[in-house]
């Protein structure tokens, strides 16, 4: 818990470093929120402005052209903004931990130093994800064959194997959680950083897993509450963006802080 407490203290002290991440998250959320608000307004108009359409099953479908472009646009913006927000945030946080002195005036150097690293990290995760999907398809086909041959016992075996695969995926994701941290802190290439992440996380696996789950649960609860405000035009999506911003920022601080400590580097808090 001391690492989570330190990460929260860092957030409170250097909250200004989370501003770029919050702004970009809020913009993407705002674009999606505009579409949602338009669809809701259209549905209200259908209900109260033209009662004759109440019996028209296609009335709801008519709202799709309003909401879909904004939702898709928001998703695309969020994807693009990640290539700015994540490198910038990792760079700013690492500088804050390294020197105890970081501000938004460092954002340019943070992006320039870590943009290529993030691109390589993204490509690495994409390749790994595709390989995992292919492997999962092969395993699924084999399991289907086993199930057809073994009958009732095959169903039990299938359940056990699927559970084992699920656990293996979780373990693998946790072991790679410091992948980008290793690239940012030690300037490692994508393959060496993946190996370094596995090496470091193995020494504190349960700490990483426990903090990740705890932060996710707390943010999910708070996020559910704040998401009720999304229907408020403009302000709602902006408020709802606070939770994912805090979650991402705290996890970045936690992973960088723990990685630096485990690799013998001093954290300036």
Image (cartoon, rainbow, N blue to C red):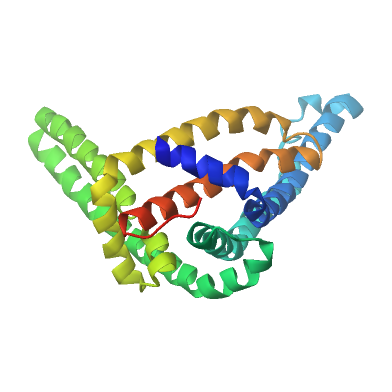
Q: Is residue 264 visible?
A: yes
Give whichever of 134, 212 is nearer the camera: 212
**Which corner quadrant of the image does residue 122 belong to?**
bottom left
Residue positioned 58% across, 45% down in the render = 11
- Left or right, 16 with respect to 193, comes to right
- Left or right, 196 with respect to 126, comes to left
- Left or right, 175 with respect to 183, comes to left
- Image position, residue 58 (x, y; %): 73, 36
Compared to 239, does 89 lie above or below? below
- Image position, residue 64 (x, y; %): 71, 44
Give whichever of 54, 123 is nearer the camera: 123
Residue positioned 40% across, 57% down in the render = 266
Residue positioned 24% across, 45% down in the render = 168
**Which corner quadrant of the image does residue 129 belong to?**
bottom left
Compared to 88, does 40 lie above or below? above
Q: How many marks?
A: 0
- Left or right, 70 with respect to 164, comes to right
**Which corner quadrant of the image does residue 42 belong to?**
top right
Give whichever of 125, 254 is nearer the camera: 254
Compared to 82, does 3 lie above or below? above
Residue positioned 46% across, 71% down in the render = 117
Give whichever of 158, 261 is nearer the camera: 261
- Image position, residue 260 (x, y; %): 38, 57
- Image position, residue 264 (x, y; %): 32, 59
For the N terminus, which image quadrant? Answer: top left
């Amino acid at each position: 818990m001391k690492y989570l407490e330190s990460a929260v203290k860092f957030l409170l002290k250097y909250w200004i470093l989370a501003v770029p991440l919050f702004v970009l998250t809020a913009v993407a959320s705002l674009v999606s929120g505009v579409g949602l608000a338009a669809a809701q307004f259209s549905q209200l108009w259908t209900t109260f402005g033209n009662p004759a359409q109440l019996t028209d099953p296609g009335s709801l479908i008519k709202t799709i052209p309003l909401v879909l472009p904004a939702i898709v646009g928001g998703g695309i913006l969020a994807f693009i903004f990640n290539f700015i927000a994540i490198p910038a945030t990792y760079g700013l946080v690492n500088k804050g931990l390294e020197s105890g002195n970081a501000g938004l005036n460092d954002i340019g150097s943070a992006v320039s130093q870590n943009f290529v690293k993030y691109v390589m990290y993204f490509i690495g995760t994409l390749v790994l994800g595709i390989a995992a999907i292919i492997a999962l398809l092969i395993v699924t086909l084999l399991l289907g064959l086993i199930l057809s041959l073994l009958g009732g016992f095959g169903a039990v075996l299938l359940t056990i194997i699927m559970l084992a695969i699920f656990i293996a995926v979780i373990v693998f994701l946790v072991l790679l959680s410091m992948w980008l941290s290793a690239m940012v802190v030690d300037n490692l290439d994508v393959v060496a950083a993946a190996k370094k992440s596995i090496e470091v996380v193995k020494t504190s696996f349960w700490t990483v897993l426990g903090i990740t789950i705890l932060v996710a649960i707390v943010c999910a609860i708070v996020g559910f509450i704040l998401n009720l405000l999304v229907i408020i035009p403009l302000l709602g999506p902006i408020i709802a963006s606070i939770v994912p911003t805090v979650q991402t920022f705290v996890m970045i601080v936690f992973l960088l802080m723990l990685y630096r400590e485990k690799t013998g580097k001093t954290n300036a808090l």
